[in-house]
Amino acid sequence: MSTESKTDSRSPARPFWLRGDFAPVADEVTAHELPVEGELPRELAGTYMRNGPNPKDGFSPHWWFGDGMVHGIHLAGGKARWYRNRYVRTARFTGAEAGSERERRLRGGGTSNTHVIEHAGRILSMVEASLPMQLDRELSTVGAFDFGGAVDTPMTAHPKRCPLTGELHFFGYQVVRPYLTYYIADARGRVISKREIEVDGASYLHDFAITERYAVFFDSPARMIRDWGAGIPFEWNDSHQTRIGVVPRAGGKVRWFDVESGQLCHTANAFERAGTIVLEAVRSARFEAAPPYLHRWEVDLESGRTRERQLDDRLVEFPRIDDRRVGRPHRYTYVLEMLDFVDGAPTKSLLRRYEAETGTSLAQELGPGQIPGECVFVPKSAQSPEDSGWLLSFVRDRERDISELVVLDAGHFGAAPVARVRLPQRVPFGIHGSWVPAVDEAHRSWAAR
Ligand SMILES: [Fe+2]
């Protein structure tokens, strides 16, 4: 493709996010009826979408600061109907004028490069410095979305949907007051609760968690010292106590519980068990420059005691679960295990499934030179048990110099993929994604709850 020569993506002088498997692609491609190896399950009716930074002029000063590009592959009837990749057309991307720099970032979507989800029929592309951008089902940008004016802060890229109520729980954090705002939107997408959480400043709060009755925040020493726009705005302050904040979803004050100094990277899940909140997440000892491990905290709400332990010594990130278990005990956590690095970039990785209660884990081998990204779990049906479904991930095959969508049978984790779909261009390593069921399937699934 023309992309490779334009960006000189193999030059070792470039930082890792601009070269090799991370290098941006220049073209927006549409391809239909993609070649499939194996058999695509007919139950998979919908679109796998994944967001990631893809700087439009080929340069960004940090991996986090490239323009968002969403790659999508639509599956139906056992076929891979189409692939598309589209830039998220933010104000920054189009060059639209919109008041001050802060206003433009907040209302114009910023880089919008971190995650993409569906809620209440809207597809939202997100970055935590800004409001989300709405996309249509073919990945074209509709515009910035502020929940009808109800959200006036940045919005996290890691909202949590409660599988019991259909509510979307999310927050916004920023360097100015209100530092931390907790929102709940109902299943129809209307904001029904907006509450300021009292803190004396913002910390790097990339992710959070919910249980059936609580929202769970992680306040770390990575303090936000300026607004986004001039590099990474956090500074590690050892004098700031690391703590877990527990907020009743139904209303009431936050309670803080001190824990060991550290940074929560990504949440796997949280749940309540016998008066205790269990939080499972990837933790590093410090912001950015420390290795990430899977970790569990237990917070006894009555005594106030906390317990924490590292679950494994493997380097992992991007934990995902069956989203129907959000807020309730889950059995399996799927992660991306990173086995080797060059200049800070993972060059060898695999998918691993943890079963936290038994302390065991299982690796998914894909073959030499094959590097997966985050995987998402898709249940076979609304009622199927936790491991009955598929795992989808974009995989880079270095030996064949291609990218594929790989579909694994979650019930036979570790076995060969059930299907591989060859993509028409390289998909750069990216960040987070979601399965967006076809409209009919989404309605059936909701009606069955
Ligand atoms: Fe994230």
Image: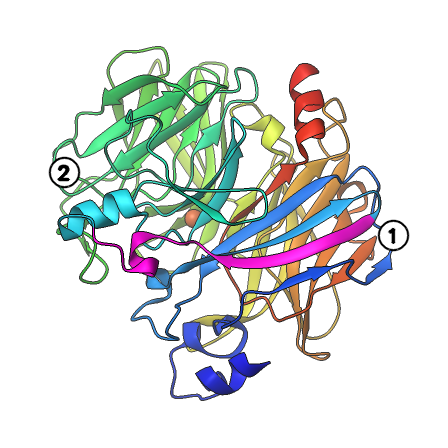
Across and down, in percent, residue 101 comes to 16, 53
Residue at left offset 22%, top offset 43%: 203
x%, y% of residue 239?
Answer: 13, 46
Q: Is label 2 in contact with label 1 (beta carbons under 8 Å)? A: no
Nearest to the observer: residue 338 or residue 128: 128
Vertical arrangement, residue 164 with respect to residue 217, above or below: above
Asked where in the image residue 13 lies, by quadrant, the reply is bottom left
**Magenta-tinted stretch:** 79-97
Residue 310 is a magenta residue: no
Give the amino acid type for the residue marked by disc 2 in the picture. Gly
Left or right, 410 with respect to 375, comes to right
Q: Amino acid at mark 1?
A: Glu
Does the rendering let one see residue 89? yes
Number of residues whose C-alpha sits closer than 10 Å to that of mark 2, classed few (under 14), some (14–19) or many (20 or more) = some
Q: Nearer the viewer, residue 428 or 361?
A: 428
Q: Which residue is mark 2?
A: 201
Residue 37 in the image: above or below residue 22: above
Taking 63 as reference, is 405 left or right?
right
- Closer to the N terminus: mark 2 or mark 1? 1
Q: Picture coordinates of residue 263 (x, y %)?
A: 33, 47
Q: Is residue 219 above or below residue 400?
A: above
